[in-house]
Image: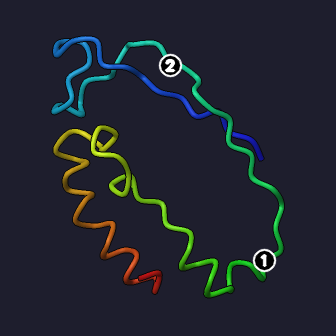
Amino acid sequence: MEYDLQLQFFTDEGQTPIEDPTVVWNSAFVTVAKLTISKESLSVAHDDNFVKEVEINPWKGLEDHRPLGHLNRARLLTYPQSAERRGAV
């Protein structure tokens, strides 16, 4: 499978407000990367080392790249709980 990873950039508080998720942003999408996922054996999903190494958490990155907005701040609290429940921590 292949996915284009795209960003929408902030233009101004009226058109692209960070704290109001009800506003549809009209700024253009910019493709910044292509993600290719290879076909894998289903046994990988049961490999404890694989589960511990794979963690998708936007809060574990550079400070400048951390998510913005109150919805993302709420997610900051739920990501560790979700990982713990899955046994990934």
Q: What secondary structure is found at the residue carrying circle 2?
A: strand
* Type of the residue with mark 1: Leu
Q: Which residue is mark 2?
A: 29
Nearer to the camera, 16 or 62 = 62
The x and y percentages for residue 24 are 32, 22
Residue 38, by quadrant, is bottom right
Q: Is residue 31 left or right of residue 22?
A: right
- Relative to residue 5, is residue 83 depicted above or below? below
Distance of label 1 from label 2 (alpha carbons): 34 Å
Rendered residue at 41%/82% (across/down): 89
Q: Residues within 10 Å of mark 1 (few under 14, many from 20)?
A: few
Q: Residues within 10 Å of mark 2 (few under 14, many from 20)?
A: few
- Relative to residue 8, is residue 21 depicted above or below? below
Nearer to the camera, 57 or 16 = 57
Residue 26, by quadrant, is top left
Q: Considering only order in the chain, which callout, 2 or 1, is on the residue closer to the N terminus?
A: 2
The x and y percentages for residue 23 are 25, 24
- Relative to residue 29, is residue 64 depicted above or below? below
The x and y percentages for residue 83 are 40, 76
Q: Is residue 43 left or right of residue 80?
A: right
The mark found on residue 42 in the picture is: 1
Rendered residue at 46%/86% (across/down): 87
Q: Is residue 24 left or right of residue 44?
A: left
Rendered residue at 24%/39% (across/down): 68
- Relative to residue 5, is residue 74 depicted above or below? below
